Amino acid sequence: MAKPEYALKNQAKHQVQPLTKYQRLKRDKWLYLMLIPGLAYFLIFKYTPMWGVLIAFKDYSPFLGFWDSPWVGMDHFRNFFQNPDFFRLLRNTLYLAVLDLVFFFPAPIILALMLNELRFTFYKRTIQTLIYVPHFMSWVIVASMTYLFFTAGSGAINMLVENVTGKQINFLSAPEWFRPLIMLQIIWKETGWGTVIFLAALAGVSQEQYEAAIVDGAGRLRRLWHVTLPAIRSTIIILLILRLGNFLDTGFQQIFLMTNSLNREVADVFDTYVYFVGITQGAYSYSTAVGLFKAVVGIILILGANKLAKKMGQNGIF
Amino acid sequence: MLNMHNTPAGKVFDVFNIMILGFIGLVTVLPFLYILAGSFATEAELTRRSFFIIPETFSLEAYKYIFSTDTFFRSILVSIYVTVVGTLICLIFTFTMAYPLSRKKLMGRNVILNLVLFSMLFSGGMIPTYLVVKGLGLLDTLWAVMLPMAINPFFLIIVKNFFQELPIELEESAKIDGCSEFSVFWRIFLPLSKPVIATFALFYAVLLWNDFFAALLYINDSSKWPVQLLLQQVIILSQMAIGDASQMGAEYIEPPEQSLKFAVIIVATVPILIIYPFLQKHFAKGILIGSVKG
């Protein structure tokens, strides 16, 4: 790190001593001063809560406080794994994560490939501007719009359904419609934004490669298969790793907003469970244990996916 | 340019491609146009017609109601306050931390960077964070919404990388002219990072304006609810009467129930849609600037 000092030392006729730690601190005093707000932020809002997960091993009581609440070891974890809720949460979380991987993950790649084939720049820009917009809307707005569209009675979609089939469907409360709605929402909201990174990767593919492929007689599909896809492969893999690393992070806000008492059987996932049990029922220690379980599995998944990618000869993210 | 598109099959493909993409673009914006139309429609029309983008009769009832009640108007003010003040805080915290971390000579830099990276992998979770906010006495204050999201670690790393890419000579020459580290940052580096500041101002503003969950967790006092939380209560929980008791005495206005819901969505979305086109040209560049080299 102290390269300039050492370089000087070797060249100079008289010996230049490398700076001592104290001198370096003094030289960079302004930089350290500037770091204070940021460091305070990380210590208070990121690292104190990490320390706070210890209440998962205690019986936290607001009256006794963090220090005086009694230790209970692994009791909360044992309770959680023996609770029938555990399998329901695991099933719902995995179900949504797999659907997400199958339906949502490829969508921006396909859309970016289609946009990339457009030659009219103005048309391309217009479409891009339109499809980016939903990304900037909040989940509350997306969920609210879903309610207004699908609600029984006056919902626009339900009125259309009634015109065609003669009766309405309880989209919002029927458990079998919960997962399709969640997928529909996320594809509508985030697919356009997801193309940004793939379009950037596609812009980097050299035109000569396409010309060479044409000279070799490659048709459109062959060019897509042999030139375009290999060019964006590493981008796809990095995003896949990130996705696998967040495998258990089913969109919390989205699911929270779409959950109601009638679809809870299929809607409850680890994150929403922590909220309902922790904040609304006050079981702080138990729900912290649930959250900690999820966080630890999440770390294992992201490190595992990263390792796997490196084994397959790809650059990982670490 | 070789004529790679001009085979008959290629032309058919092009036509389909243009049509499908046009359809996707339409599907993306139509829901929003319907909500906009619905916010100007009458109650009767909303219960009768299914899908329309031009209302038969043009009515401003819903907007009149929103801006005449304490509940809605106050929540809009709260949202504006949180977004403006919060974005300023976020930018100050992020940029003052990113700059020192971009200087490779800084002792302890790697330790701090690893702390930041670790916080992206593992977090204490909802309950321990809630207890910290509670312990600091921030519950029921707007600080609870702004401070816990003051630094987004991803954004911090991108800004750090951006500063790192700027030529080191800038710093050296300013030093020779007698600048302190802080004035190098303030007078040389910040003016050069205007597009990056604009990008992250937008990103932070969007996060803050769109937040409902921090408010749901930390703010019980409904007079301090931002508009997104109010929206959740009104539409998803169908609680129309929040805080309306204060209106009962004087001249109580009957809320136009259906179109009111449409209008609140519009009010909660439009501020973002207004700033979006101004910043669109910056953000694609802004994200890529820092993320090219890790």
Image (cartoon, coloured by chain):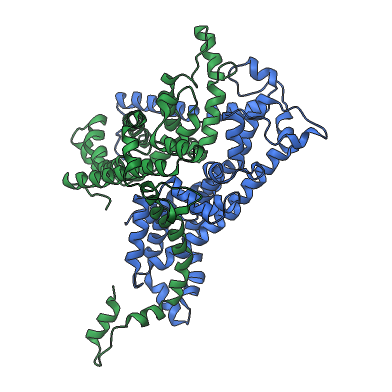
Chain colours: A green, B blue
Residue in the image at 25% along x and 89% along y = A12
Quick check: can you spot residue B107? Answer: yes
Quick check: can you spot residue A122? Answer: no
Residue in the image at 36% along x and 50% along y = A71
Where is residue A62 drawn, in percent x and y? 50, 49
Q: Where A50 falls versus B229 (above or below)?
A: below
Where is residue B104 drawn, in percent x and y? 34, 69
Q: Quadrant of residue A288?
A: top left
Tag count: 0
Q: Is residue A145 left or right of residue B48?
A: left
**Pick the front one: A66 or B69:** A66
Q: Quadrant of residue A10?
A: bottom left
Q: Where B116 falls versus A104 (above or below)?
A: below
Which quarter of the figure is the C terminus of chain B placed in? bottom left
Q: Is residue A315 left or right of residue A192?
A: left
Where is residue B66 drawn, in percent x and y? 70, 35
Residue in the image at 44% along x and 35% along y = A272
Q: Is residue B205 left or right of residue A297?
A: right
**Pick the front one: B138 or B102:** B138
Where is residue B71 drawn, in percent x and y? 69, 39
Among all residues in the image, which is located at the extreme top? Answer: A166
Q: Quadrant of residue B251?
A: top right
Residue in the image at 50% along x and 57% along y = B197
Among all residues in the image, which is located at the extreme bottom? Answer: A14
**Pick the front one: A317 or B11:** A317
Q: Is residue A38 left or right of residue B210?
A: left
Which quarter of the figure is the N terminus of chain B placed in? top left
Among all residues in the image, which is located at the extreme right? Answer: B250
**Pick the front one: B35 or B256:** B256
